[in-house]
Amino acid sequence: MNIRTIRTRPFADQRPGTSGLRKKVSVFQQPHYLENFIQSIFDAVGGSHGQTLVVGGDGRYYNRRATQTVIKMAAAHGFDRIVVGREGLLSTPAASNLIRMRGAFGGLILSASHNPGGPDGDFGIKYNASNGGPAPENLTEAIYALSQKIASYRIIDAPDVDIDRIGISSLGGTTIEIVDPVSEYAALMETLFDFDRLREFLGSGGFRMRFDAMHAATGPYARAILEDRLGAPAGTVVNGVPLPDFGGVKPDPNLARARELVEIMYGVGGPDFGAASDGDGDRNMILGRGFFVTPSDSLAVLAANAHLAPGYRAGLVGVARSMPTSRALDRVADDLGIPCFETPTGWKFFGNLLDAGKITLCGEESFGTGSDHIREKDGLWAVLLWLTILAERRQPLAQIVQDHWRRYGRHFYARHDYEALDVAAANALMDSLGGRIGELNGRQLGGSMVHFADDFSYSDPVDHRLTPHQGIRLLFEDGSRIIYRLSGTGSSDAALRLYLERYEPDLQRQGQDVQSALTELTAIARDFAEIPKRLGREEPSVIT
Ligand code: VG1
Ligand code: CO
């Protein structure tokens, strides 16, 4: 087979963000753009000879094309075997599992997750290492550095591989294995949850649920597990066929973007339980009848009840949350007498803690929860754990969450996103905040006393690597928090994320509406950052 070496030049914009490299499809379609990045990954990780590589994506536009490019470049780099999800599909959690099951060297996941799809939307690619988790920062920085001095890449000259049929073929000296994207993932779920018990619960007729796959990667997984194996009625999974443009909707499971599901859950005679997942299947939104569970609360409730599932019967060794995620989890950890770690935003920071056996469960405020079963967040896993809790406790979901608040107190929480910002204005706002936090300690801000303020810096408890500048945080004496950071998943313009949290131990006041409970804190946050003046925005684009 003919291996060609193609001359190329660097692209200045190939630094990976929170979760891989995400750009407009048109950017990826430039000649050599994708190839340069893949070559930089292979050069950064080295040692591909004789190894196994896993490849798959969320099914968005350009997924099929990119899959062929990855296969041909991996073959040119001497991989012994390339395991590919049929039709180029693998949800992010399924890819993480496959890497681990096959003892693979690593995997390339073709996804821009919750970003919009289609020819005018975004595409993305990220590398996961042999533990199944996203490449750590030192590796993504090494990839970027190599992309800035690349002069050529290697690719095999061959016709496209048939990725639509399960089976084994070869390309040069490389074995190409096309696998069913679902089966190994479903088998993993069966080791963690009691499928017989869930089947009985879902088939009892007394419980109804709806799962919205948002025309993204989770559709086939949800159908196979919820409907085929657990016997939920056909039609439980809606929008279950992956589409290259996700049906024109941003596949982001939150109250604003998963409107269809939200309306049904809040409507008359709605189901008992509703859930949705994102483009690549690693996020989850959880709803009860007329009731929304914030992701931070969901994480805390899962931690407090995980022992109800067979996979977690032995209890949790520790938990972790990203810094902006509410501290509801910390209270559960305190109660259980286990450590709770606080990491920067992005799943890559949980990897070391999971690998070192320091934590069992972890999550983020951005609709991401997961455990040590893989090294990515896992939407369907969260749904199965919630179903287990509902099946064991036999209480309405809202009651389970309210009981949780009664016991631990309620953390009112909201995230305000200011999207499509001018990059310079967003950076100037963050710089200004960074310059002013030093004077804040012990001062009043809008009637509240600041306990401390800093620019969050993370020291990894396992390898002791330092990651600075992970968000500006203001902690008040009453336990409230305000956090500001810029998104690292956008493809062109900037987005400011403002995170607001207020603790309410008083049962009588836990029933308030979230936005009104956070009114004062919101005003303080807007004023201190001079949001209207600096960004020209009165209101956030989305509140989650
Ligand atoms: C966002 C979320 C973060 C999450 C990341 C990837 O990042 O805030 O918590 O890990 O997306 O999720 P940022 O930098 O835009 O805030 V996924 O499902 O898009 O891979
Ligand atoms: Co995702």
Image (cartoon, grey):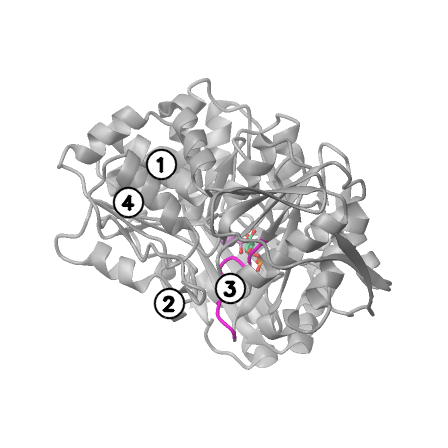
For the C terminus, which image quadrant?
bottom left
In the picture, the disc for residue 384 is 1
112 drawn magenta = yes
Spatial separation of the CA atoms under disc 2 and disc 1? 26 Å
Question: Which mark is in front, 4 or 3?
Answer: 3
Above or below, comparing residue 493 to residue 250 in the picture: below
Q: Position of residue 515 (x, y in %)?
A: 37, 61
In the picture, the disc for residue 115 is 3
Spatial separation of the CA atoms under disc 1 and disc 3? 25 Å
Q: Amino acid at mark 3?
A: Asn
Above or below, comparing residue 239 to residue 463 in the picture: below
Give the labeled residue for mark 2.
247
Image: magenta residue range: 110-119
Spatial separation of the CA atoms under disc 4 and disc 3? 40 Å
Q: Nearer the viewer, residue 537 or 101?
A: 101
Is residue 472 visible to us here? no
Q: Position of residue 453 (x, y in %)?
A: 65, 53
Describe the element under mark 1 as helix, strand or loop.
Answer: helix
Q: Nearer the viewer, residue 361 or 341?
A: 361
137 drawn magenta = no
Q: Nearer the viewer, residue 451 or 525?
A: 525
Q: Amino acid at mark 1?
A: Leu
Name the side, left or right, on which 20 lies relative to 49.
left
Q: Amino acid at mark 2?
A: Gly
Q: Residue at x 68, y 54 (%)?
A: 72
Circles 1 and 3, Cβ within 8 Å, touching? The answer is no
Describe the element under mark 2 as helix, strand or loop.
Answer: helix
Q: Earlier in the sequence, mark 4 or mark 2?
A: 2
Name the side, left or right, on which 543 lies relative to 346.
left
Q: Quadrant of residue 409?
A: top left
Is residue 381 visible to us here? yes
Spatial separation of the CA atoms under disc 1 and disc 4? 32 Å
